Amino acid sequence: MEQLRARLMGAERPELLSLLAAVIAELTVRGQSYYDSPDAVERLRETNEAIHRIAGHLRDLSDSEAIFTASRADGVLEQIRLLTSSTSSQFVR
């Protein structure tokens, strides 16, 4: 996760916004994987909350004056941790 954190913190604005959008897309795939699961409601709620948080960062950071802080990076990484390691590894170059 440290490599991903470094990438997020060092990304130019267009790349950062693209990464956040990609995380949202991957979270929706995660949610779909739980449709037939016995704990679907809990997992879908968890996924929806993660999407909500990342979408909020994406919205806020669409303003070129908004700063991508270390605290914000930690929040993004917290949501990315819901993804499988093979999925989240795609975000590291």
Image (cartoon, rainbow, N blue to C red):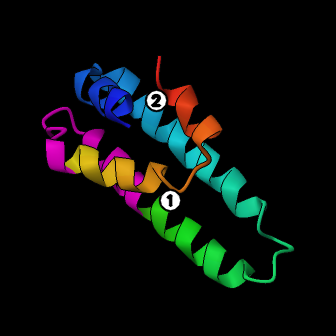
State if disc 2 and disc 1 touch (CB < 8 Å).
no
Residue closest to the eye, 25 or 39:
39
Q: Is residue 48 above or below residue 25?
A: below
Residue closest to the eye, 47 or 52:
47
**In the image: residue 61, left or right of residue 92:** left
Residue at coordinates 35% horizontally, 27% vertically from top-left?
Answer: 3
Query: Amino acid type of disc 1?
Result: Ile
Task: Give the residue pinned by disc 1.
Answer: 51
- Total numbered badges shown on the rendered structure: 2
Q: Secondary structure at mark 2?
A: helix
First along the sequence among labels 1 and 2 = 2
- Residue 60 location in percent, x, y? 26, 48
Residue 9 lies in the magenta-colored region:
no
Q: Which residues are magenta?
A: 53-71
Query: Amino acid type of disc 2?
Result: Ser
Task: Give the residue pinned by disc 2.
Answer: 18
Residue at coordinates 30% horizontally, 54% vertically from top-left?
Answer: 75
Residue at coordinates 27% horizontally, 41% vertically from top-left?
Answer: 61
- Residue 39 location in percent, x, y? 73, 82
**In the image: residue 41, left or right of residue 45:** right
Q: Secondary structure at mark 1?
A: helix
- Residue 71 location in percent, x, y? 17, 50
